[in-house]
Image: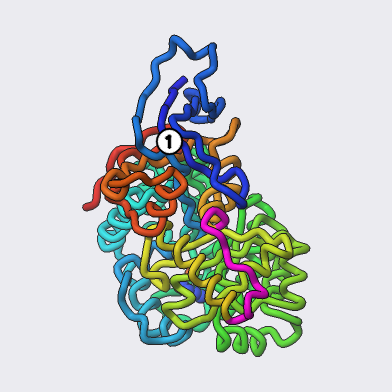
Amino acid sequence: MNIYRANIIYTPSPDAFRILPGGYVCVREDGIIAGVYEQLPEQYRTAEVTDYGDRLLIPAFNDMHLHAPQYRNLGLAMDLELLPWLNTYTFPEESKFKDTAYAERIYHRFVHELWMQGTMRSCVFATVHPEATRMLADFFVQAGLGAKVGIVGMNRNCPDTLRNTAEEVVRDTRALKQYLDVHGNNGLVGTIVTPRFIPSCTEDMSAALGRLAEELQLPVQSHLSENRSEIDWVQSLEPDTACYGEAYYKYGLFGQRPTLMAHCCYTDGEELRLMKRQGVYVVHCPTSNSNIASGMAPVRMFLQHGIPVVLGSDISGGHYVSMLRIIQYAVQTSKLIYAQTQGKMPFLSLSEAFYLATKAGGGFFGKVGSFEEGYEFDALLVDDSYLNYDNYTLEQRIQRYIYIGDDRDIRVRFCRGKELTEPPMD
Ligand code: GUN
Ligand code: FE
């Protein structure tokens, strides 16, 4: 048993932070939490305790949508909307990942950055290239981080340098799964079925990926209703569907398996009903939605309907890897909607947004993202002494850390109970 003492802060439910000043978390050798306590129980009185003093211990972050091969474009190219942005900046960059030496250089830095920012689990789009994608998965394993890594399926409306066939994406996803079943660090790193979005995938490819998800019992990730031009395009490509979501549904890619759909800025009506019925997750990506001028996803409305919502950085549509910034943008975006609706749509509280980035996202990986008995111990030790120069309460300290803290304040990172050392950058 490993016992840690610190100021423990987490969100077992969205409505408030649970705060244990000088509390204890007991973690079994297999990385599972045995209990969280205000006072150390009698049975552990003689056990050794790692005392982190006045520091904060919080759940680590889960980034539920991002593009590893767009890492080099971070902070660049925000002058276009989605469709021209993809063609002008994104597809040319992703095409470079055929070259494994290039992929190695960028993917090492990418995984290092996730470690640095305290993102212990993520759902990642790679590219169509199987060698580079397997390398990315290996880097996650070597770093001790959790991830679901997807080989992207795309066979239309894309350059020849960034295209695979239905047969290839099925074969390569199957091979990646077989590889990670053996080498994926006891399930910490796995794969996920990843059609890029409807405009990138012919009917054959979408149907093949739907069948594959069912056969291999894999989850699914894609993009949905991000931008108005994209939605109009999908309508013309799939004229017999009532909404964009139904196009995925038709192919077994909309909740038949656990499914993450990024964006959903314009989801309503039939699509909303289908998402709710199918238990499809919305991945809210507020920085990306603002950068490429997509819109504002109606997160409060999704929550009111009981639709699961999680958060994503969507780099490089999004310009920050840090989930602290994504939490902050999620709150700020919800306040713009609040103002626009004359208060009819209540904005997100900070604890709600923190919950989305920890326990809600963690649910996609099992029992992850909270400090409760039976949960995997994914945690960050935060030294906020630089911010905490006056008599702030712990409630105020977590607020300040989320809004104005960053990775420099993170002292120790745990994923599934294991303290992670810094992975290589080059
Ligand atoms: N839709 C299809 N591909 C992409 C992508 O790479 N980024 C974003 N933001 N939306 C997409
Ligand atoms: Fe995306």
Q: Secondary structure at mark 1?
A: strand
Quick check: is 342 in the magenta stretch? yes
Query: What residue do we see at 63% from left, 80% from top?
Result: 341
Give the tally of numbered discs.
Answer: 1
**Which residues fall within the magenta stretch?**
340-352
Q: Position of residue 42 (x, y in %)?
A: 53, 12
Q: Position of residue 25 (x, y in %)?
A: 49, 28
Amino acid carrying label 1: it is Asn
Quick check: is 43 in the magenta stretch? no
The residue beneath circle 1 is 7
Residue ranking furthest to the front: 391
Q: Position of residue 420 (x, y in %)?
A: 34, 37
Q: Position of residue 321 (x, y in %)?
A: 37, 61
Q: Nearer the viewer, residue 349 or 126?
A: 349
Query: What residue do we see at 32% from left, 70% from top?
Result: 74
Q: Nearer the viewer, residue 71 or 115?
A: 115
Asked if residue 323 is positioned above or below residue 154 in the image, the reply reads above
Asked if residue 260 is positioned above or below residue 424 in the image, the reply reads below
